[in-house]
């Protein structure tokens, strides 16, 4: 009790004589934040054409721009009331202000745009990196010389010296002086000074507020909580601006006729209706072609002939339906090709033979390789019907068979990228090749998580390898298999890279037009942003439904 | 006390520049075009620097557009949407109508009228007809053509020699072309007589040279519902049906480079690649004459001015400078582009390219004279139309649709894309 009384008696909350400078500074900065926020919002409201997104979005964004003002006003009131929440709010605002100013300053300095130059400078002076490697090797060696501490410390000193020298050489010859001069040169612009000043002011005041925990009677739990939220705040703001914001925007645009560059009109569900409209009709005697049987605005999607009767299915947007069909086909073909080989590989590579990690890395490599480079290899070196290696291998194999067994198999030049019968398979093969390594790692982790006791018990019972695999490995891998299949399907439903890179540079054949490729083409080639947004949301609904069904089925099976 | 004073002084010192005035007299113009390779980027950059150095009060920023991962069009559309597009940029000829109708580019007619020495007649008339088009009949100028290009047949002299054939000569016909394709394919192995890509222009040539065309006379509707379309597509489809061509949809360029194709139809932009990769004798010839007469495409793209530019006068001057004979000559000197000006020093520079190799550059110039200019569709949606054409022609070539059915049904499918505008 005595301690409590003492704490209460010295509590800064009740000590009004020494008001910390950080509090009035924070109030001033919050007032400045309100001013900046209101100015920004007024600017947003004042724009004649809000990036061709329409009044609704303009008002919404303007309202969002006022959020910091409201938060800063609340912070001021709470600070005056000596409420600890005022400190948290101010701290968050100042921290975000400092982060935003820092990012803007780095942008002005040209750091983001200069990544290529930095990488180039490092590459050109990569010889100096050897110094760092040698330094690390010496340092590692010194750590292992337990018998001679003197020698160890000498080697450590040499290592540090070489490392420092290599670093200085790398920076000097990599152009650190020029880069510094370039950054200093940016200070002939007003905005550089403003960004620097804001960063320092926000940072200093945030630091001042940070130090006032005792003044506000902060508890350990409170400190842990605000520290967590503070560290998360840039990410949360980023999520709202760069993910949730565009998501909402695309939902709004899907109900408009947006073409991206002029103010959109609200058209309700027209985009959805355009994509989903189908017509079922019968081809009459007067209709020479199936197209003749359809109403204006519809194109032939499919014809079904039963007996003498031909039913014509027409669609307003045939590419929507074609792309859906292609996407599902792609998924159906991808699942076995991306799962079964991955499982087999995982079983084979789950061994302790020396060098096995190299094999695992080799199989995993396609998953992390750049898709553009891969596509060039597949498109020209492998899939070309006349100069590609796959057809070359098939030709040689055919010749071998004919020469060895006296058969007369014809050398069929498969048009992997030109014959409509093989286009889909070509895409699936490339996609499976890329994803098998990743799935293999998942299966490998799953296999290594199976308790050894189960296998030992099975061996005691006389189970052979195949039975162990069938009755232990496979059932135990059910959660992994479920995860692999779900992620493969989700990725498959979003397939874009394979058709885009394999068939780009010319017209995309109907057979390779997948759902995401279709919405990309409608958005950027046809400049129909509203329509492609609607396609995107319909695809989202489909993926969501498919995943939900899978979860349901899995839950029922597990139960 | 001293500490607080110090903090205030530091704060004041840091905030002082906010009230400073940063006078800026120099105008900065950003401009962008789509180069095909680093050599072109270097030439455009050099041209930009040269113009910049000679132009008081204006600073130029050249931005090469397009990369392996971001297409030129995607970036430009995104920037136009966000209001950050350059002052001057290049767009393909087929996009001019759409950009103009959306109000994205400036009508430069008044600025051009005030410019001494400027004449539309200096450029190919087929192009200027499209760049001066307006729906309401008013005087317009949407930009100036950066360059031009035409198709030609790149032929492998070694394969022609091996097949005992004469090289393609001026005025050669579809019959000569087909016969050469048959003879070269008959050499056997992986050799094919012919190769072309599967976008609209190569198959469009067969339709045009047969006497038909994508559009009606005033470009307000479909022009494909006729017998000439059938003839053109039959000729095209038979090349694939009879195995004379690199499969439709497969990139024939690397196959030609590998020496496995006798005749390869492509534009001037393919010449540097052939020069760099071909290890056999080769040259170019004009496209064969079809039943409808000689035909070709006149490909073009234009420098246009962003409707939101703050400096329209300077932007227009930049467009003129970028299309001057000197600059066009420098760019043509790389061998991939043909000047869009009729005659003049730029054309001479072009004709001199690869002269040591004896390349028949004149074949491209000849093609331009009768080429059908890439056509911006003012009363329709070009991308909607061409997407259907690509798909339906692929069906014809693949044997899923007869040329006759194509001709009979295509207009019903593409006409809605005219009606919507």
Image (cartoon, rainbow, N blue to C red):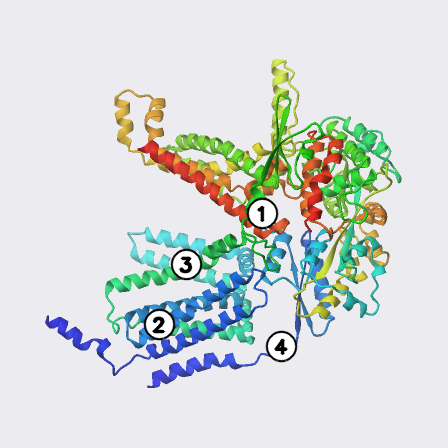
- Mark 1 touches mark 2? (CB < 8 Å): no
Residue A75, disc:
2
The one of B327 and B397 positioned closer to us in this rendering: B397
Q: Which residue is mark 1?
A: A520
Q: Residue A405: horizontal and vertical position, in percent?
A: 60, 14
The chain identifier of the residue carrying mark 4 reads: B
User: Does residue B4 sit above or below B406 in this rendering?
Assistant: below
User: How far separated are the C-alphas under marks 3 and 1?
Assistant: 28 Å
The disc, 3 or 1, on the residue closer to the chain's N-terminal end is 3
Q: Is residue A120 left or right of residue A347?
A: right
The one of A111 and A4 positioned closer to us in this rendering: A4
Point out the frontmost of discs 4 and 1: 1
Point out the frontmost of discs 3 and 2: 2
Q: Secondary structure at mark 1?
A: helix
Q: Is residue B18 left or right of residue B314?
A: left
User: How far separated are the C-alphas under marks 4 and 3?
Assistant: 37 Å
Q: Which residue is mark 4?
A: B24
Q: Quadrant of the N terminus of chain B?
A: bottom left
Q: Which residue is mark 3?
A: A235
User: How far separated are the C-alphas under marks 1 and 2?
Assistant: 44 Å
Q: Residue B288: horizontal and vertical position, in percent?
A: 84, 38
Q: Secondary structure at mark 3?
A: helix
């Amino acid at each position: 009790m005595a301690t409590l009384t003492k704490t209460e008696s010295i509590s800064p909350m009740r000590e009004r004589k020494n008001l910390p400078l950080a509090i009035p500074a924070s109030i001033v900065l919050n007032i400045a934040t309100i001013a900046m926020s209101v100015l920004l919002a007024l600017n947003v409201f004042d724009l004649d054409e809000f990036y061709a997104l329409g009044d609704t979005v303009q008002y919404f964004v303007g309202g969002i721009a006022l959020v910091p003002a409201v938060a800063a006003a609340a912070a001021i009131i709470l600070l005056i009331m000596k409420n600890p929440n005022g400190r948290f709010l101010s701290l968050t605002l100042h921290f975000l202000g400092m982060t935003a100013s820092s990012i803007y300053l780095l942008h002005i300095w040209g750091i983001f745009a200069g990544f290529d130059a930095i990488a180039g400078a490092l590459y050109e002076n990569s010889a100096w990196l050897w110094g760092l490697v040698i330094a690390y090797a010496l340092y590692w060696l010194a750590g292992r010389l337990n018998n001679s501490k003197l020698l160890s410390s000498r080697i450590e000193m040499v290592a540090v010296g070489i490392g420092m020298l290599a670093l200085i050489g790398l920076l000097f010859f990599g152009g650190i002086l020029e880069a510094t001069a370039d950054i200093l040169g940016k200070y002939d612009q007003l905005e550089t000074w403003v960004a620097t000043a804001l960063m320092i002011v926000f940072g200093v005041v945030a630091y001042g507020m940070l130090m006032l925990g005792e003044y506000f009677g902060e508890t350990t739990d409170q400190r842990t909580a605000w520290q967590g939220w503070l560290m998360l705040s840039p990410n949360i703001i980023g999520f709202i601006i760069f993910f949730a914001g565009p998501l909402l925007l695309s939902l709004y645009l899907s109900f408009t006729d947006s073409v991206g560059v002029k103010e959109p009109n609200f058209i309700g569900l027209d985009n959805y209706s355009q994509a989903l409209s189908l017509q079922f009709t019968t081809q009459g005697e007067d209709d020479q072609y199936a197209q003749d049987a359809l109403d204006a605005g519809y194109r032939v999607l499919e014809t079904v002939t039963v007996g003498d009767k031909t039913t014509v299915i027409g669609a307003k947007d045939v590419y929507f339906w074609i792309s859906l069909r292609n996407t599902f086909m792609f998924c159906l073909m991808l699942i076995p090709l991306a799962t079964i080989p991955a499982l087999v590989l995982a079983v084979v590579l789950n061994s302790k033979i020396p060098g096995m990690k190299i094999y695992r890395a080799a199989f995993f490599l396609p998953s992390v390789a750049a898709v553009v480079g891969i596509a060039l290899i597949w498109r020209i070196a492998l899939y070309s019907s006349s100069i590609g290696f796959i057809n070359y291998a098939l030709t040689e194999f055919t010749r071998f068979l004919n020469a060895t067994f006296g058969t007369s198999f014809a050398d069929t030049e498969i048009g992997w990228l030109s014959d409509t019968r093989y286009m889909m398979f070509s895409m699936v093969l490339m996609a499976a090749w890329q994803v098998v390594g990743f799935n293999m790692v998942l299966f490998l982790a799953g296999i290594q998580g199976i308790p050894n006791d189960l296998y030992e018990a099975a061996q005691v019972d006389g189970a052979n390898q195949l039975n162990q695999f069938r009755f232990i490995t496979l059932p135990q891998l059910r959660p992994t298999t479920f995860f692999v299949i779900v992620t493969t399907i989700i990725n498959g439903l979003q397939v874009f890279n394979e058709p885009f890179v394999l068939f780009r540079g010319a017209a995309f054949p109907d057979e390779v037009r997948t759902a995401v490729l279709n919405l990309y083409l409608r958005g950027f080639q046809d400049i129909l942003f509203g329509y492609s947004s609607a396609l995107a949301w319909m695809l989202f609904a489909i993926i969501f439904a498919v995943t939900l069904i899978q979860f349901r089925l899995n839950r029922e099976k597990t139960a | 006390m001293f500490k607080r004073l110090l903090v205030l002084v530091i704060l004041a010192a840091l905030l002082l520049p906010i009230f400073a005035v940063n006078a800026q007299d120099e105008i900065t113009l950003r401009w962008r075009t789509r180069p095909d390779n680093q050599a072109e980027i270097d030439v455009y950059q050099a041209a930009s620097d040269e113009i910049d150095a000679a132009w008081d009060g204006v600073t130029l920023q050249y931005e090469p557009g397009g990369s392996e991962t971001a297409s030129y069009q995607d970036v430009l559309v995104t920037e136009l949407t966000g209001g950050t597009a350059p002052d001057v940029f290049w767009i393909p000829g087929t996009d001019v109508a759409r950009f103009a109708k959306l109000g994205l580019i400036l009508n430069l007619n008044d600025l051009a009228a005030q410019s001494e020495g400027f004449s539309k007649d200096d450029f190919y008339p087929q192009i200027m007809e499209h760049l001066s088009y307006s729906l309401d009949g008013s005087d317009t100028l949407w930009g100036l053509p950066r360059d031009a290009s035409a198709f030609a047949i790149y032929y492998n002299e070694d394969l022609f020699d091996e097949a005992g054939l004469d090289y393609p000569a001026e005025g050669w016909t579809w019959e000569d072309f087909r016969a050469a394709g048959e003879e070269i394919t008959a050499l056997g192995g992986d050799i094919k007589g012919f190769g072309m890509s599967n976008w609209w222009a190569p198959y469009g040539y067969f339709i045009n040279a047969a006497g038909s065309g994508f559009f009606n006379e005033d470009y307000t509707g479909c022009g494909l519902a006729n017998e000439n379309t059938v003839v053109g597509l039959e000729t095209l489809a038979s090349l694939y049906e009879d195995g004379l061509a690199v499969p439709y949809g497969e990139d024939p360029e690397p196959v030609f480079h590998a020496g496995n194709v006798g005749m390869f139809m492509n534009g001037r932009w393919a010449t540097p690649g052939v020069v760099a990769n071909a290890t056999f004798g080769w040259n170019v010839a004009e496209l064969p004459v079809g039943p409808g007469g000689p035909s070709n495409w006149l490909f073009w793209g234009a420098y246009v001015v962003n409707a939101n530019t703050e400096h329209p006068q300077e932007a227009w001057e930049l467009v003129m400078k970028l299309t001057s004979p000197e600059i066009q000559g420098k760019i043509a000197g790389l061998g991939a582009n043909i000047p869009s000006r009729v005659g003049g020093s730029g054309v001479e520079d072009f004709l001199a390219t690869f002269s040591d190799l004896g390349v028949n550059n004149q074949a491209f110039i000849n093609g331009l004279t009768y080429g059908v200019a890439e056509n911006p569709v003012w009363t329709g949606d070009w991308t909607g139309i061409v997407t259907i054409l690509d798909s339906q022609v692929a069906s014809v070539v693949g044997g899923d649709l007869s040329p006759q059915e194509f001709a009979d049904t295509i207009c019903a499918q593409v006409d809605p894309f005219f009606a919507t505008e």
